[in-house]
Image (spheres, rainbow, N blue to C red):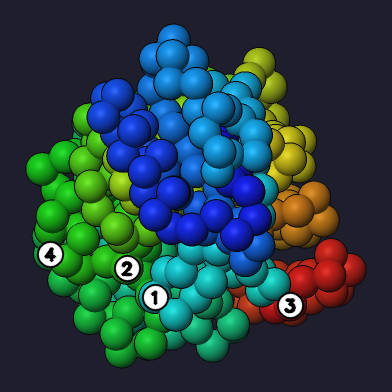
Amino acid sequence: MIIVLKPGTPQSAADEILAQIAAAGLKPLCLPGTERVVLGALGDERVLGNLHLENHPAVERVTPILSPFKLVSREWHPDNTVVRIGSVEVGGPRIAVFAGPCAIESADQMRRTAEAVRNAGAHGLRGGAFKPRTSPYSFQGLGVEGLHILRDVARSCHLPAVTEVVEVSDVGVVQEYADAFQVGARNMQNFRLLTALGNSRKPVILKRGMAATVEDLLMAAEYIVAGGNPNVILCERGIRTFETATRNTLDLSAIPHIKRVSHLPVLVDPSHGTGVREYVEPMARAAIACGADGLLIEVHYDPRSALSDGHQSLDPDAFKGLMQNLRPFIEAAGRTA
């Protein structure tokens, strides 16, 4: 429920209403504005109705939040949210590009790739230390050793680092070494993990599950925001359909829909979305054109030797070309590179 207070309402009146909401066992929210204050109340609608907040002399109107996802909805927060990963803003005027290998394999591999993406204009570094794989025989990542490499390389290249967290028990150590968590498609509805990330204030890049609807994705984000962490970035990375020409079907129609119903920023991962390196650049262009706030791109200094997803990874020259070729699309979208 949204409670809009009358202009000029003193803070004491807002505090009184918030206390009334909390006393009823509901979650009180406050969104201060330049002209008026908007309050929120989350919980059982029957309890909300019994409070009769519309009768309070400081209340201008009371409006229910109709969408099932409350805190990530534009009904509650009409303005775009900007999330900072290190010094990089996601959701602002600039298109943010995070690039790097699917998996951290060695210090040399990470350093060579990081220097290449930095020199090409990437704003952040991605790399997986923990790799959930379909096959138990595939490379599973270097674990904590990979986190050490990621942090050292990211610092030397002056890039914020993003890496995947796969278990609740790993949240603390990943938080220590990375500038942002990534929640992969397989963990999008790992509600214990989402709840744990809600207790952090570190940014979370939340990837859409392979069989998840947009509403499923937004409800997963709601877990994190409801837990107290507002720094959530959504990521469209393709869904599994009957089509076999590409690894996944990159659902770019989800981007304008998400932008209409939610205030959270959105990234697109065309590498996982297609699984084919030749398709990464065309889909990256399309992602910018339809309103994405940034991109996740897989880059490896030598894709032929990659231990994970080499077939969809760009080499440094291809990534440099992508960054140059994106500029006209970024400008046409009214954004900056």
- Sequence-first tag of 2 and 1: 1
Q: Considering only order in the chain, which callout, 1 or 4, is on the residue closer to the N terminus?
A: 1
Q: Which residue is mark 1?
A: 86
Task: Bin the neighbour count of mark 4 within 10 Å (Cα to Cα): few under 14, some 14-19, many 20 and up.
Answer: some
Point out which mark residue 336 bears. 3
**Mark 1 and mark 2 in contact (Cβ < 8 Å)?**
yes
Q: Position of residue 194 (x, y in %)?
A: 30, 37
Q: Secondary structure at mark 2?
A: loop
Which mark identifies residue 145? Answer: 4
Q: Is residue 307 left or right of residue 246?
A: left
Spatial separation of the CA atoms under disc 4 and disc 1 = 22 Å
- Structural distance between the alpha carbons of marks 2 and 3: 23 Å
| Residue at which label 2 appears | 179
Indicate whether 226 appears above or below 120. above
Q: Secondary structure at mark 3?
A: loop
Q: Is residue 267 above or below residue 68?
A: below
Give how far across and how far down residue 13 sits, in percent. Answer: 44, 49
